[in-house]
Image (spheres, grey):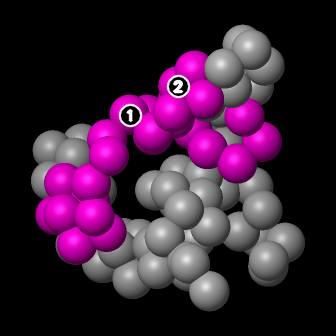
């Protein structure tokens, strides 16, 4: 994994420095943010294509510009949660 991607949520590409998720035992997740992952489970269980639409809506609501939203959506298939290679 690219070192730049290591510090990003492996589900939504948000920087982990902002808000780490939690494992089932309460420890901080090293891979996922709290918006995507809590208590050892994904908050939104949905296929990637649905997640792209969902995430784009959330980012738009929070005021992220078009280019930033499209770049994030473009990166999703490369993240650990979605990359099943």
Give the vertical position of 57 relative to 65 (above or below): above
Mark 2: secondary structure: strand
Q: Residue at x 79, y 79 (%)?
A: 2
Find numbered disc 1 in the image and state the secondary structure of the residue it sits on: loop
Please indicate whether residue 45 sits to the left or right of residue 58 in the image.
right
68 with respect to 52 (left or right)? right
Q: Nearer the viewer, residue 84 or 34?
A: 84
Q: Residues within 10 Å of mark 2 (few under 14, many from 20)?
A: some
Q: Circle 1 is placed at which residue position?
A: 43
Residue in the picture at 69% in, 26% down: 23
Q: Position of residue 28 (x, y in %)?
A: 75, 25
Give coordinates of residue 74: x percent, y percent: 39, 83
What span is in magenta?
29-54
Residue 48, compared with residue 7, is above or below; it is: below
Give x and y (percent) for residue 62.
24, 42
Residue at x-position 72% and y-position 13%: 26
* The C terminus lies in quadrant: bottom right
Q: Where residue 27 sits in the image (x, y, percent)?
A: 78, 19
- Residue 49 belongs to the span the image colors magenta: yes
- Of residues 81 and 64, the one nearer the viewer is 81
How many marks the image carries: the answer is 2
Quadrant location of residue 21? top right
Q: Are marks 1 and 2 in contact (CB under 8 Å)?
A: yes
Q: Residue 76 or 81: which is nearer the viewer?
A: 81
- Which is nearer the eye, 22 or 8? 22
On the image, numbered disc 2 is attached to which residue?
38
Q: Is residue 42 visible?
A: yes
Cα separation, mark 1 vs mark 2, equals 7 Å
Tell me where residue 49 sits by quadrant. Answer: bottom left
Question: Which residue, as the protein is rendered here, is positioned at the far right?
Answer: 3
């Amino acid at each position: 994994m690219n070192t730049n991607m290591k510090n990003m949520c492996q589900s939504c590409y948000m920087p982990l420095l902002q808000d780490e998720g939690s494992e089932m035992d309460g420890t901080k997740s090293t891979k996922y943010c709290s918006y995507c992952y809590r208590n050892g489970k994904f908050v939104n269980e949905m296929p990637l294509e649905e997640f792209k639409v969902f995430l784009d809506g959330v980012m738009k609501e929070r005021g992220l510009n078009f280019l930033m939203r499209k770049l994030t959506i473009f990166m999703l298939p490369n993240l650990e949660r979605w990359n099943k290679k």
